[in-house]
Image (cartoon, grey):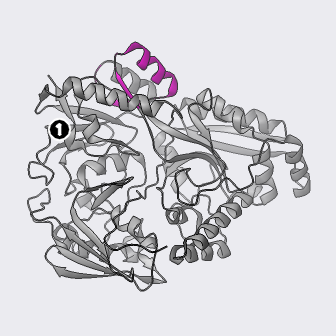
Amino acid sequence: MNIKKGLVLLFALVLVLSVGCSNKENVSEKTKDAVKKTEEEKSEKISEGGRIILSVGDDPKVLHPFYATDRSTMTINNGLFDPLFVKDGEDIRYYLAENVSISDDNLIYTIKLKDNLKWHDGENLTADDLVFTFQKIVDEKQNANSYQNFIIGGEPVKVEKVDNLTVKLVLNKVSVPFLSTISGLSPIPKHIFEGEENFEKSEKNQKPIGSGPFKIKEWKKGESVVLERFDDYHGGKPHLDEVVFRIISDPNSEKVAFENGEISTRYIDFETYEKYEKEGNFNVFGFDEGMLNYMAFKLNSEALKDKKVRQAIAYGIDKEELINGGYNSTKYAEPAYTVLASDTLYYTEDVEHYDYNAEKAKKLLKEAGVENIKLTLGYINGSKEQQNQALVIQQRLKEIGIEIELLPLERGAFYQKLLDPSSTDFDLVFNGYVMGQEPDSYKLIFTKEGPYNFAQYKNVELDKKWEEAAIEVNEEKRKTMYEEIQKEIMDDMIQYPICYPKALVSVDKKVGGVEEAKTVPIFMFEDLSKLYLTE
């Protein structure tokens, strides 16, 4: 596959450690109609200033672009730090970058920044900041999440300053997915972090200096994060004075707060979506997130080390029953059979589907020579979908001789245990991720050194195949390689795919600018500067 000079792409490389819900067919079309109608009604009623209050389930982990992995942190960081650019289908939207070009040999990527960019403290954002950012990403000591993506052919990508607004990234070998890597990147300020030994633990993350439409005003741990308008924002002065992220871990409390007008938006389940849509008191939106909801096997569990046991569990689950339990019908969640989201390049369903087969499950357990297995399934407390699905799995696996203990956890505790490779609190875990349309991004989950390899999966030969696929420029060969990767992961059954949901969101009718702000995966709104209150 030849990459044409000047082509600019973005596939958001993000992992989200919480599970959303969705609608498959007509929700997106209804959303378009709702947005159009809402914006037409409010187009002449913009009230400059004021604040909107968004809810997040937990405190951000660290307000720094290198380290965000969960929805709360990513959502808040999105208001603080701008990316270089984004691409939505054929629609390219530049943020900090003015343009990006690629050499004819696909080894040099040139990034030119817009002029007169400012950091929140008034300092200029220049090529020096980009050079510093790229150099620190490939510094192993900083443990940046995207470190692996900047190691091409075993060597770190080199960065060169061309002028005050331009840098070149030089690869030693062609890497087909490299555009995905640079497009999702948000630079960090050199003048703030130069000399810091450990960026992740730096006190400077408590009051981050970013480049986004809003800057940090106040962070009350366990209560809220308040952002205030950045008047020198390159995209124009934001409409709102403040954006507040109120921390509400309990879904019931969040629901009450929203319906009482204490918060402006929230993610909702399918029942609430239908209720709000019928009553008409709030605007509701549904959109594709490219998310996969799944159940992972923790391979540090002795009972799950044998592949046949994991396969038996997969055959012992009725996927349709599982989806109906969480979403009432497949109308709200499409069945998933592989570990890639359905909009990912080279996605295939030509893998083992593990259709429900209790007898085959029992046979595999017998072949593995195990009996009286007891496992713990962990998930986030308060998620109706996860609770219902956990009960379905508990009942089905009991029928094949496996006892499942349910372990609902408060959101913060869940993340802590999930991220701790030594944790043995649960053997199975519900989770979800959004990794974008470039399949190479998934290697962060399924390779030995991948930062999101929570299952602790180790497959040396498959790791090599991931690396080979990333540098394969022949499209047909690359397609075959990623299809083989999917088949092998599904054969190893380290992750049971459940469904591809869409996000459902409710918005207070006083909030306008939804169409311009764009509903997007993870962040809910891509550009907070475009939201406003109506009179």
Residue range of the region highlighted in magenta in the rendering: 261-285
For label 1, the residue is 242
Determine whether 453 is above or below 71 in the image: below
Q: The C terminus appears in which quarter of the rendering?
A: top left
Residue in the foreground of this view, choosing between 394 and 114? 114
What residue sits 16% from the left and 73% below the top? 165
- Taking the magenta stretch, the answer to whether it contains residue 252 is no
Determine whether 170 is above or below 101 in the image: below
- Taking the magenta stretch, the answer to whether it contains residue 271 is yes
Q: Position of residue 379 (x, y in %)?
A: 58, 40
Q: Position of residue 377 (x, y in %)?
A: 66, 43
What residue sits 36% from the left and 28% below the top? 33
* Residue 298 visible in this rendered orientation of the protein: yes
Classify 10 Å Cα crowding around label 1: few (below 14), some (14-19), many (20 and above): many
Residue in the foreground of this view, choosing between 345 and 136? 345
Q: In which quarter of the image is residue 49?
A: top left
Secondary structure, mark 1, is: strand
Determine whether 68 is above or below 315 in the image: below
* Residue 60 visible in this rendered orientation of the protein: no
Left or right of 246? Residue 479 is right
Q: Position of residue 443 (x, y in %)?
A: 54, 66
